[in-house]
Image (cartoon, helix red, strand yellow):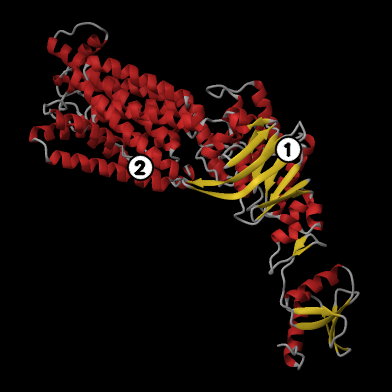
Amino acid sequence: MRPTSSIISLDQVSIGYGTGRKDKKLVQNLDLTVSERQLIVLVGPNGVGKSTLLRTIAGLQKPLCGSIQLFNKPTNNLNPKMLAHYVSVVLTSQIDTGYVTASELIAMGRLPHTGWLGTFSSLDRQKVSSAVKQTKVDHLLDKPVYQLSDGERQKIMIARALAQDTPIMILDEPTTHLDITNQMNIIQLLRSLVKTQNKCIILATHNIELALQVSDRMWLMHHGTMEDGTPEDLVLNGALAQAMSTDLAPFNPERGTFQVQHSSTYPIVLKGTGIRAHWTQRALERAGYYVQNEGAVAVEIADEDDWLIYHNNQFIRSVDSIGSLLYQLSQLYSSSSLSHPDV
Amino acid sequence: MPTITQTASSRKIPPLAWLIVLSFGIVVLGLADIAFGSVSIPGWEVARILAGQKASNDTWNNILVNIRIPKTLTALLAGMALSVSGLQLQTLFRNPLAGPSVLGISAGASLGVAAVTLVSGQSVAVSALSSGVGQGWLLVVASSVGAATVLLLILAVSLRVKDSIVLLIIGIMIGNITLAVVSIWQYFSQPEQIRDYLLWTLGSVGNVTNEQLKIFSVLSLLIVFITFLLSKNLNGLLLGERYAQSMGIPLLITRISIIATTSILVGLVTGFCGPIGFVGIAVPHLVRSLLQTSDHRWLIPACALAGAFILIGCDLVSQWPGRAWVLPINAITALIGSPVVIWVILHRRNLSSHFR
């Protein structure tokens, strides 16, 4: 049933690492086929073998058994140079390289395309400059790599992979250690590469909420198994919740987020709607209250920037921030006999 | 600190200029090294001999043609070979403290030489000059084999141990074991054999005959040229082996080439000149800071030139003009090299980030 024009195909592949006599198998008998140029996001808990899978697909590590084909060519028949024409990688390992400047690092992407001494042709120069343009790193080019911030370095590494000019790009946790702006920049960049450059990109991440929003396809690794599908399908069939939820933070399929469970001991009534009500409820839940319809204490979201506190339908006071609301509520609960029977 | 970098980069001298400066320096120091020595020879006579004419004094002629010129050329070749080896090892092991002497490769060569000097039962090592060509080559082959053995051992360990500091310590320990074997061997040897061996360990660039020098120069220049052809692979290794592999660098071939070229270079130099320390580790650091680049296409020629420059300089110092004595060259290289290593460690903020 495999399409004839597959980009990546894994046939009964087991991955892991051999330690002499004993092989440590992480995932066995994996069958996967990629035939569209998509953004594929690989998720799964720590230690399930995400990096091992990525390295195996990239040909940096041999599968324990089974065969991997890139563009219908088995990878074990490809020499490193040919492999480097198909796949470029951005790995998790820190790279720190003395006097190498950002532009020299990006230029290294052309290594598989140049001759003995690595002399550049006009095509090489053109590929490097278009990689620079797409990643918008012109201002960094003269800086030594060790002076770059994590986000800048990651962009340079991606630019290097782009300069390598391969149809497949594999990135292992490219957004780890990055702030939210840089994460979004990188993800947007990768999405646009899939669309405009017709690349097939596989990336591993722990940011499932982001993955759900941006991926065309999700590979979910969990306890030696692999679920493959559109992210929405994996949410609806419960696979994602099953793989990634914990008692402390179960997956909320409605919001697509993991929600921290708070131990709620105090009942409270919340009246009002809108964004202020939403964030008030979150603050109350975190502080140990649970919102219900009937109860002795009530909080009303007033029209102005105020919160009104009621006790047995009697107005107590109004406060002007969630911070002082929580403070007043704690005073109220500790001064009266309001403590919950459970406590 | 962007301002500091900007000034630093604006002061950066192009690599080619450094190559020219170093070549010029080699010519100047080389001439000085030939002109000065324990026997003082007038400058114009030196010039005449260098120009291919006979000097007025046969002894002067003999001293220059058979002793001083081969000695200077040996220093040039040995400095070049050791520095390029050190550079390759530092890149391969991604460790700033790697070098022929630190990783026990010189110790391996010493074991090879000890095997020849202590077993053969005849005096061979004091001077390859006096012991005949055949014996001299035996030393070179033995020391190359010894160097290669240790290097292969370290390579085998490096396949399992990924941490470069651990690997470095293992290398030092292998060196220690090798030297311990040599010590035990010495204990059961005749005094004159031990004396030969000890003299050899002091290092000298003055024991190479003109005949040997021909082959030494052809081999070492050829192999340094081969390492230059490896510079693209070495550049790929700067990002680590996985990245190198992902960019099409054939790892196994690269590793084997680096090890083969390094062990032949170190074996040659150690066989001819004894275990000369610190040049291999210190020169690559000096060159990187001078050229402010990590591109091996520049670093390899620059290391070759700087290594030659420094070892000729050390030779000049060791036979300080007008003195009758000649200091062991190893003492001079250690005196110059050790402060360089300390300076590198203290002044490289990014030492750990230099290689990982």
In the structure shown, which secondary structural element does the residue marked by tag 1 occupy?
strand
Residue A200 is labelled as 1
Q: Is residue B9 left or right of residue B215?
A: right
> In the image, residue A244 lies at what x, y percent?
70, 60
Give the mark toward the camera: 2 or 1: 1
Number of marks present in the image shown: 2
Q: For this rendering, which residue is in front, B137 or B273? A: B137
Q: Residue A207: give x, y in percent of width and height.
A: 70, 55
Is circle 2 on the same chain as circle 1? no
Percent x, y for residue A227?
73, 51
Q: Chain of mark 1?
A: A
Residue visible at 78% across and 51% down in the picture: A231
The quarter holding residue B328 reads: top left
Residue B252 can be seen, yes or no: yes
Residue that appears at 80% across and 57% down:
A237
Q: Is residue B348 visible?
A: no
Q: Nearer the viewer, residue B340 or A219?
A: A219
Q: Nearer the viewer, residue B209 or A129?
A: B209
Per the image, the residue denoted by label 2 is B341
Q: Could you say which is closer to the camera, residue B59 or residue A91?
A: A91
Chain that bears disc 2: B
* Quadrant of res A274: bottom right
Drawn side of residue A321 relative to residue B255, left or right: right
Q: Amino acid at mark 1?
A: Cys
Q: Residue at x 54, y 39 (%)?
A: B242
> What residue type is disc 2 on?
Val
Q: Residue at x 35, y 24 (%)?
A: B25
Work out which residue is located at the far top of the displayed protein and give it. Answer: B53
